[in-house]
Image (spheres, rainbow, N blue to C red):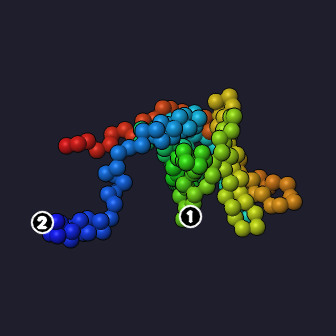
Amino acid sequence: MKQSLRPLLAMLLLLPPAPAAAQPPDMQAMAAEREAMARLAWMDGVWRGPATTQTPSGPHSVTQTERIGPMLGGTIKVLEGRGYNPDGSTGFNAFGIISWDPATSTYRLHSYAQGRAGDFTLTPTADGYVWTIPAGPFSIRYTATLAGGTWTEVGDRIVAGQPPQRFFEMHLRRVSDSDWPAANGPGPH
């Protein structure tokens, strides 16, 4: 009987580990993630306001909107930004996920916009956040602040030894609460 079990045991050892979904949740890590994400709760809701990007052909202005909310029990934050041209067409659309990694104590922004995607470090500040995109010989730094109910975000091109060059600015006001994206998910039946 022992010899007949050996091949079975050997086969079981060769099987891949159980998928992550089958693992019990790490309640301590999830609590740490929720606590860290609470610093960014001010972002939740629907926001709207003017935004202008300086392009080679001149300034391009849109009505910028953001809808933002928690997901996965508050362990991540989901963002969608849309910029509407004066004629109502969509001139800009971006999607992002902010998370906090308890192992490294860092916030991450995974962003999709304009045919590009990337992972970036996001650093909360006393009144907003900062995140940077490395772009070869320069970088792009976005700085957001919340003051007097207005979310201001600016984008600066940073080149070593030169003053920052501002190319983007938006000023948004919170217009409503939102239960997006977690509401109305599929039910069990």
Q: Secondary structure at mark 1?
A: strand
Instruction: Please give the residue where the numbered disc 2 appears in the rendered image.
Output: 1
> SS class of the residue under badge 2?
loop
Of labels 1 and 2, earlier in sequence is 2
> Residue at the location (57% across, 57% down)?
119
The residue at which mark 1 appears reads as: 116
Locate the C terminus and report the quarter of the image it occupies. Answer: top left
Q: Tell me the kind of residue under disc 1.
A: Arg
Measure the C-alpha gap from mark 1 to mark 2: 59 Å
Residue 125, compared with residue 9, is above or below; it is: above
Q: Residue at x 71, y 57 (%)?
A: 140
* Residue 11: percent from left, percent from top: 25, 69
Q: Position of residue 145 (x, y in %)?
A: 68, 38
| In the image, residue 111 above or below residue 149 | below
Q: Is residue 131 left or right of residue 31?
A: right
Up the image or down, 38 lies above or below 54; here it is: above
- Foreground disc of the pair 1, 2: 2
Is residue 124 at least partly visible in the picture? yes
Q: Residue at x 26, y 42 (%)?
A: 187
Residue 8 appears in which quarter of the rendering?
bottom left
Q: In terms of depth relative to the viewer, which is nearer, 167 or 130?
A: 130
